[in-house]
Image (cartoon, grey):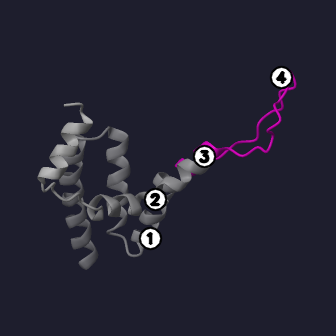
Amino acid sequence: MSYILIIIVAYFFLRIVGKILRHFMSLSNVGFWLLMLGLLFIPHGAWISLAIILGRYVIAPIMRYLPKEKEKDYSRKKGSKSDGTNWNTIIMLAIPIFWPFLILKLFVKDKTLPNDNSPFDYEQHEKSNGR
């Protein structure tokens, strides 16, 4: 009886979420997310759902941008640098490592103190501007 109740609840939940998502996403993305949400109603299906999401949004982009085996082009002469390191890929993969530091710097950075506008500072300012 509990499985029938779970199926009924899942059906209505997925219909409502599908209608909401259709306003924001393409049909293929809606189908993907409905499948992921549907797997949550299956026992131990959350692990499968998590593995598919990680594969689609983490592993696939990394594999897409990894350097592929290049064919040798003998028509051009290479320069003296032939180490084969693709720095663009290395920097792109290192960016998520630095996000926490950048966010922390945004909130914790030193604020400049307001200027007290002492008369001496104002005189020096006037002298340096040639007045």
- Marks 2 and 3: which is nearer the front? 2
| Residue type highlighted by circle 1 | Trp
- The quarter of the displayed image where residue 130 is located: top left
Q: Secondary structure beneath disc 2?
A: helix
Q: In this view, does 111 lie above or below 90?
A: below
Reading the image, the residue beneath label 2 is 98
| Residue type highlighted by circle 3 | Thr
**11 with respect to 89 (left or right):** left
Quote the CA–CA distance across marks 2 and 3: 15 Å
x, y percent for residue 52? 47, 59
Q: Which of marks 3 and 1 is nearer the N terminus?
A: 1
Task: Specify whether residue 31 is in view.
Answer: yes
| Residue type highlighted by circle 4 | Arg
Reading the image, the residue beneath label 1 is 47
- Marks 1 and 4: which is nearer the front? 4
Seen from the viewer's position, the closer of residues 46 and 10 is 46
x, y percent for residue 78? 82, 30
Q: Which of marks 1 and 4 is nearer the N terminus?
A: 1
**123 with respect to 79 (left or right):** left
Q: Secondary structure beneath disc 4?
A: loop
Residue 76 numbered mark, or none = 4
